[in-house]
Amino acid sequence: MRVRSGVARERPETDSRTMSASTDAVDESLKTRTMDEAPVGITIADATKPDMPLVYANAAFERITGYAPEYAVGRNCRFLQGEATRDKPVEQMRAAIEEGQATTVVLRNYRKGGELFWNEVTIAPLYDETGEVAYYVGFQQDVTRRKRAEQAAADRAERIERERTAQKHLLERLDGIIAKVTDAVTQSHSRSELQREAVQAIGEVYAGAWFGAYDPSIEAVEPDEVVGETGSPQGSRFVVGDVTAMSRGGGGVREEGESRGPVERAVAGALAERHVCIESLDGGTGAALTSVAAVPLHYGEATYGVVCVYVRNDGFGDHERAVLAALGRTIATGINALESQRTLQTQETVELRLALGDHPLAGVATDLQSQLHYAGSVGDRDRPTMLFEVAEPTTQLDGEAVHSAAAERDDIEIDTVLAETTCGPVIELAVTDPTLQELLAAHSGELRAAVIEPGIARVTVEVGREALAQSLAAAAMERFESAEVISYCRRETREETSQGFVAELESELTDRQHAAFLRAYTAGYFEWPHDTSGEEIAESMGVCRSTFHQHLRAAQRKVAAALFD
């Protein structure tokens, strides 16, 4: 083909290249108008001049690029390129030009305003009468929408593949773990066995895992039952409340304002929000460990603790989070079932020690400037009363002094003062404020001990179930403004039979005490009137009357101590 007036002419038929057809019926103006009004961008570059400047650009080129033909003519088309333009399609066009070939590429170009677009460019050579390339014609088409659709399809396919791979990985990772944890829950005979078996099953699948029981008295979790690689948390303490200056692993403390570590954040978040909390470790806990998931163990209002799960060179997916949450609920349900079973069998209790600064008894100790020790409750009056032994009073206390000290109080009623001639009298009183008694009754708690000092009452309560113990602690801190949990202990107890009680009591009695007690009981000494006198029993034992009474009183004290203490 040859070029005349910018319009391609037919080359001689002797040329073997593919020709285009034209007739004299199509005039030059129609051909020019067709190029000017074509819906695609058309440019012509002069291949005979250095840098191949454009000699023609149509209106569509301006619509696509924003550059007017007046600006484009005289410049090489590379002004459309920029930083985001890749080298590969540019090199492909350069190679085609050097070889005199046509080619099509898609590359990133810049419009006049600076915005990027995808440009599909086709270039083809135009030859003169001698067969040399005289011009290069270019066709530009904005294919940004198509590329975006293709990219969206590719992204969707990649996302689906990632999800498929993640689900496959999840199934491989969790294959059998649910069954193992379920077996641990259904077959374990104790809480410690359940915790150990469940953590073992989880730790075998992941890089490592540990269980930590929650201690509400210090609002902290201490790791136990460690399996696999966990960054050695044994001996650490993770604070989950607002407690400051609390000892942690390595002997350090977290002062007020100090930030938590990733594991502590995960544990605190899991127990506070009651859902699985995941934190990135950033290589801080172990070189190969990348993430930790804290799984809370909740059942109703009870918080049993947390299981921390570690992975190496990996993370936790959303599906995995759901599975771990289900495992946590399963373990917590198993612990609750064992707690309920132990309650029925009286094998385990929770001992809760509370400090009540605003309890009426603390005010009585302040008035008496003495320490009061709880000795028991009695119920032979019109309302329940309690006995307190006065320990080391600062002044001699008699009945009048005790009544006088409590006379102006409306929250305490003094019934009587016993043994007032001793250095430590016994006070029988009633607390008119029923708050503590109501809390104990509502949570099936039993008051075991109480030490009352001026300004503070420390009470020890025994509760049969952990859920009730935690609920009682929370209720006490809500009802008493200055309440504080001092300690929270789970205690194993043995079921005591009547035969065991008798055997233990008999071991406390001496032979003379046992003999005196048994003869007095069988001879009707405790009946009224006496079936047998003390002199007769003393004579049968070969001792004087005072010696008999000495042995009898000692035996009675030991029986009373076994019953009341």
Image (tube, rainbow, N blue to C red):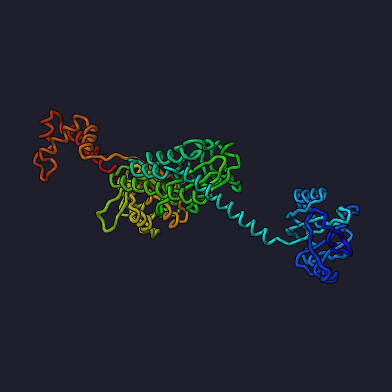
**Quarter of the image that includes the N terminus:** bottom right
Q: Relative to residue 156, is residue 185 drawn left or right? A: left
Locate residue 69, reporting x and y percent.
Answer: 85, 65
Question: The C terminus lies in which quarter of the figure?
Answer: top left
Q: Is residue 415 left or right of residue 113?
A: left
Front position in the image: 471 or 238: 238
Residue visible at 84% across and 71% down in the picture: 27
Q: Is residue 97 shown left or right of residue 319?
A: right
Q: Is residue 509 visible?
A: yes
Q: Where's residue 474, x and y in %?
A: 43, 54
**In the image, farthest residue toward the right:** 49
Which residue in the rendered view is the most extreme toward the left? 531
Residue 497 point in image, percent of width and height? 23, 40
Position of 49 with respect to 436 (left or right) is right
Query: Closer to the camera, 192 or 26?
Result: 26
The residue most toward the front is 14
Q: Residue at x 14, y 37 (%)?
A: 520
177 lies above or below 6: above
Instruction: State the image quarter where residue 116 is shown.
Output: bottom right
Residue 109, position as x, y percentages in the image: 77, 57
Residue 554 drawn above or below residue 335? above
Total residue callouts: 0
Between residues 123 and 249, which one lies in front from this camera angle?
123
Residue 397 in sight from this viewpoint: no
